[in-house]
Amino acid sequence: MSISSPESMPAGELNARYDKFVVDLLGVIAYGELSAFERLSSDARYSPTLHDRALLGKLAVAEFGHFELVCARLAGMGMDAELAMAPFQREIDAFHDRTRPADWYESLMKAYVVDTISEDFYASVSRFLDADTQSVIAEVRTGETESTVLAARLHQMLADDPKLSSRLALWGRRLVGEALTQAQRVGRRQRFLVGLMPGGAEQAAGEVEKIMASLTRNHSKRMSQLGLTA
């Protein structure tokens, strides 16, 4: 665990704060993965080809596997996964309601944007965690294979129909704005990172600001690689 404990803070209190952070983090990841499974499974029916339907189906199966991995980690910590997910259900559901795709093209863009931003976030916070939790989060991260497949399919879509560029660029900007606002809202309410920082809320706020800036930069790079304006 890559934090230092002030001498004035009892070890038990530090451990309790850390455990709460990990449970909250795993809870939001678990519900995010379950929601991704549901979203991809539902959106697959709008696929223009059977190949595309199979593509989203395969990604949906992977997301459910990630959900099960996180639930297993929570169970190993003696925590009920449903209780850990419950505080985040309303916010995540509301996010998906606000960002409901209008068609297949927007659905694929949403899968790419939300999943890659989530992966960047997991990578940013995992450095603060113990080795066992780091290992689970590393497995949950979709990885370059799936992201590359989605990016390749988006490239092909844009090449086949260049008129999609302006619409998908606008959609991508809306998605990243909603995703970052959502992350900040949940983070403030659950006080993410506060339990890991010797400097408390002030230090945590600075770290969150750095993470958000990094998420925005990485998103802009990915949009540029697709030929879209972030």
Image (cartoon, rainbow, N blue to C red):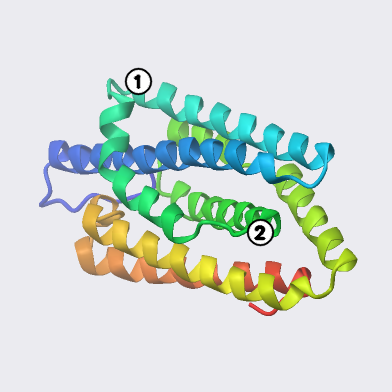
Nearer the observer, 22 or 220 = 220
Could you tell me which quadrant the N terminus lies in? top left
Q: Which mark is residue 131?
A: none
Q: Quadrant of residue 205?
A: bottom left
Q: Quadrant of residue 102?
A: bottom right
Q: Residues within 10 Å of mark 2 (few under 14, many from 20)?
A: many
Question: Residue at image x 64%, y 60%?
Answer: 106
Q: Residue furthest right?
A: 160
Mark yes or no: residue 130 visible. Answer: no
Q: In terms of sequence position, does the residue under pointer 1 or pointer 2 come before the other?
A: 1
- Vertically, is 174 above or below 14? below
Residue that carries the numbered disc 1 in the rendered image: 75
Distance between the Cα atoms at labels 1 and 2? 33 Å
At numbered mark 1, what does the secondary structure look like: helix, strand or loop? helix
Question: Residue at image x 43%, y 61%?
Answer: 98
Q: Residue 33 in the image: state x and y as whole percent.
A: 49, 38
Front: mark 1 or 2:
2
- Vertically, is 100 above or below 85? below
Mark yes or no: residue 148 visible. Answer: yes
Q: How many marks?
A: 2
At numbered mark 2, what does the secondary structure look like: helix, strand or loop? helix
Nearer the observer, 14 or 83 = 83
Could you tell me which quadrant the C terminus lies in? bottom right
Q: Residues within 10 Å of mark 1 (few under 14, many from 20)?
A: few
Q: Residue 51 in the image: state x and y as whole percent.
A: 83, 38
Q: Residue 190 in the image: state x and y as whole percent.
A: 24, 52
Residue that carries the numbered disc 2 in the rendered image: 109
| Residue type highlighted by circle 1 | Ala
- Vertically, is 23 above or below 111? above
| Residue type highlighted by circle 2 | Met
Nearer the observer, 185 or 36 = 36
Nearer the observer, 35 or 205 = 35
